[in-house]
Amino acid sequence: MTIRNKYLFMAIFLFSCAINAFAGRTTFETLPKTVSVDLPEDFILEASEGNSSFQLANTTVPVKAIVRIFEKGKYQSPAQALETILKNLGISTSIKDVKWQSQKCALAQAEGSISQRKSKLIACAAKIPENESIILLFTWCDVVKAKDCTAFMESFIDSLCISNESYFTPGLYTESLYPTEGKTQKINMDILGTKLTTEMEENALEASEYCIDREYKTLCLYMKSSAWIQAWQRYYRMIFRDSCGRLSRACFDITNALAPACKDETDLAQKLLTWVQGFGYERQKNAADFASLPSILLGGGSDCDSRSMLLCVLLQSANQDAIMFVSREYQHAIAGFISSHPGFSFEVSGKKYLTGETTAKNINWGNISQTQSDQKKWIPVQLP
């Protein structure tokens, strides 16, 4: 059922070619290519208005959504755009200002009548830095379904990227809960004999664990979906994005401390791999069974997928093309990065990734157990 509201849709054209999905990331013809929405899987296009308004429905989760694009000058600010849309829907709620991507964005949450049904909604608006247009995301579900769908809708809001920087920083919704411009804490580290001091936000651990819990709840909704692989890939992408922002200073300091003594990029990658292999192995007590990366740097335990992601975050921050591989059959995860050195590798999108085992000690890049070498049983998780 579409929203029959003259202020939202003056003309409807089904299956517009203006919205293009690539894996989970959706881009728009009228916006720069750096702008995208990393949609949860199983969304379909219900209706569109030209190249500026798109109504979506999810076929797995009882949630609907709208993406609207307003050209430069239509509204003075994201808050004004969001306030106008909510007013036209007859929904009265306060607009929260959120500083995100060095600008003031807008966020709203409320209950109200949509399509004559009592619904819970979450909406946000942000200005596109490159062309100063405004993009608005609006998602809702029946209020009786809110308990099961709220994490999914929060994830939808956080899926917005408005610039290249967005792909390596926490999303707008998470930023509203855990601002990244707060107090920091010092971390003393010893990496294979190299001592250094770095820092991260005091709320980094709590924020990261919120993101993991939310994304795991979203992933669980796809247990019986044919798109479970894509949902699994998105789960890791969303955590990777959040982790990059929280560990940016630590990654910078670690790379600067290790790189001067390394012969080349593979030598740096090997030192990082050897360091990660030395972590204490520990299954996590959270539902996701995934250790947040801030907790690892603070001395907590970890297992294969959290170690592999940490390695990818470190390598990406050092401008190396890194990737994760996960396997349901092997119940395991490994890391990969582009290297000319010989060894076991995967080819993904025309790129050759050397693999790294993070849970066995003294194993170099390019080595993998023969019992886990069937490439058909590994799923690549491509990262920005």
Image: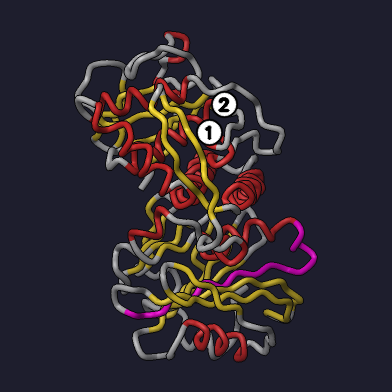
Q: Which residue is mark 1?
A: 306
Mark 1 closeness class: few <14, some 14–19, many ≥20 residues within 10 Å:
many
Query: Between 76 and 104, which is closer to the camera in this rendering?
Result: 104
Asked whether 213 falls inside the magenta stretch, the response is no
Badge 1 vs badge 2, beta-carbon distance below 8 Å = yes
Q: Which residue is mark 2?
A: 303
Query: Can residue 377 be seen here?
Result: yes
Where residue 207 sits: x, y (%)? 60, 53
Q: Which residues are magenta?
A: 132-147
- Residue at 76% from the left image edge and 62% from the top image edge: 145
- Residue at 65% from the left image edge and 38% from the top image edge: 288
Q: Is residue 271 left or right of residue 67?
A: left
Among the 4 quarters of the image, the one containing residue 374: top left
Q: CA distance from mark 1 to mark 2?
A: 6 Å
Where residue 220 sits: x, y (%)? 66, 43
- Label 1 sits on a secondary structure element that is helix
